[in-house]
Amino acid sequence: MSAARPSRSRLRRALLGVATVVLVAGAAFGARVLWELHDGRDAARPAAQLPAPSAELVAQGAYLARAGNCMACHTARGGAPGAGGLGIPTPFGTVYTTNLTPDVQAGIGAWSADDFWLAMHEGRSRDGRLLYPAFPYPNLTHVSRADSDALFAYLRSLPPVAQPARPHELRFPVNTQLALAAWRTLYFRPASFEPDTRQSAEWNRGAYLVQGLGHCNACHAARNVLGATRNTLDLGGGLIPMQNWYAPALNSPQQAGVAEWPQADVVALLQHGVAPQGSVVGPMAEVVLNSTQHLRTDDLNAMATYLRGLPQQPAPAPRRETAAAGADRLARGQTLYANHCASCHGEQGQGVPGIYPRLAGNRTVTMEPPANLVRVVLAGGFPPATAGNPRPYGMPPFATVLNDDEVATLLSYLRSAWGHQAGPLSTFEINRYRTGSTGGGY
């Protein structure tokens, strides 16, 4: 009996220690949440009286807005540029973008450059209210103060539009500032871009654009159940929530890594949307259309240098066994390919350079997950119209031509033809992508 007492005593001390750690951690978490909620700003203070910005600063800001693709989100279909109102669907509800025009009541006409910097760097509105990270401030916090001021000058030059902000349609408790403060406590800290002194100036410029204004990580990273990425350096690929598109890993040679590409081909893909290795479709086509095709060649080269220098990761483990789909099914898939695809993509999947992409050796065909392959077949694929490719050839949708079983049979053939070794697809999987029930990425 006496020998057991010290053991129980040690157990009590251990439990007390654990409880103390939990209480301290909980108190620290609560304090951080309260700090996030406290802003100390006066929402009723008068509008800022600002001098007119120089033409040079406005032009610089317009260029940076292109680099950040700001207007793509802050312009509703058919609406005035920058007036907001575009709905961004998320797994938690719909977030509506805000009015960035200089209207005093509805837009940012009452803001100062300090107010705008607060939004960019800390994710807070002029009155201290916490902003939702659909506005990608986890990336934009790396933007320099000088570039923030230039962006603000450009936005002040837009025609003011009296379009009030539309309230978000988010579920409880996500629609509360308390929940947003807790999220930020876990996943966000204001930061600044720190150049890597071991790298060239061009590499660092590319890192600044990719990590910050370009916010590439906002799509090209997996998100957890609370919608957060690991960090802004994560470019390991992820499903884009609610869109059924997969933003492939930029650091994987099996997905979208470009470490082995010639520099000129990476620049061509960003500038024209097409390169000898393939073309962009889906959300990336919109990025090229609205943003990267308008960037200077030096900045495109900087981005290409950074992307080519990313440490390459091994291919992820396949989610299924790559067993053969069966001779009969592959024969039916080959027939479907001959009837619907070979006239453009060639009998051996060789494609037509600059017109129809090759399928033999195409990473999209064998990629895991197969979201983009299925999406292109069902909904079509359309590269952007750019100065270097003004009349791109698109692929028509086959959603009304082929049923789920036929699509699964066709794609299973493609993923095993011409030396490919990717696993077959099931009718159930195709149906999930067709109906949008794939989980949205987190």
Image (spheres, grey):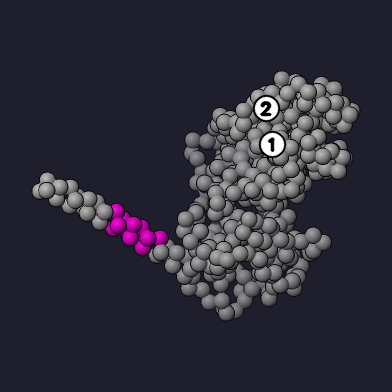
Q: In this view of the protein, can residue 342 be seen by the observer? A: no
* Magenta segment boundaries in residue numbering: 17-29
User: Along the polypeptide, which appears first: circle 1 or circle 2?
Assistant: 1
Q: Which mark is residue 370?
A: 1
What residue appears at the point 14 percent right and 50 percent down from the top-left corner?
5
Q: In this view of the protein, can residue 323 be seen by the observer? A: yes
Q: Establish if 406 lies above or below 240.
A: above
Mark 2 residue crowding within 10 angstroms, few (<14) / some (14–19) / many (20+) = many
Dividing the picture into quadrants, the one containing residue 349 is top right
Prevailing secondary structure class for the magenta stretch in the rendered image = helix
Tell me which amino acid carries mark 2.
Ala
Q: Which residue is mark 2?
A: 422
Local SS, label 2? loop
What residue appears at the point 56 percent right and 72 percent down from the top-left corner?
127
Q: Establish if 33 lies above or below 59.
A: below
- Along the line of sight, the residue nearer the viewer: 269 or 343: 343
Local SS, label 1? loop
Q: Is residue 21 magenta?
A: yes
Query: x, y percentage for residue 161?
Result: 75, 70
What residue appears at the point 57 percent right and 78 percent down from the top-left corner?
45
What residue appears at the point 61 percent right and 74 percent down from the top-left corner?
48
Q: Furthest-front residue in view?
A: 1
Q: Establish if 383 lies above or below 15.
A: above
- Along the line of sight, the residue nearer the viewer: 296 or 425: 425
Tell me which amino acid carries mark 1.
Pro
User: Marks 2 and 1: in contact by CB < 8 Å?
Assistant: yes
Q: Establish if 343 lies above or below 153.
A: above
Dividing the picture into quadrants, the one containing residue 260 is top right
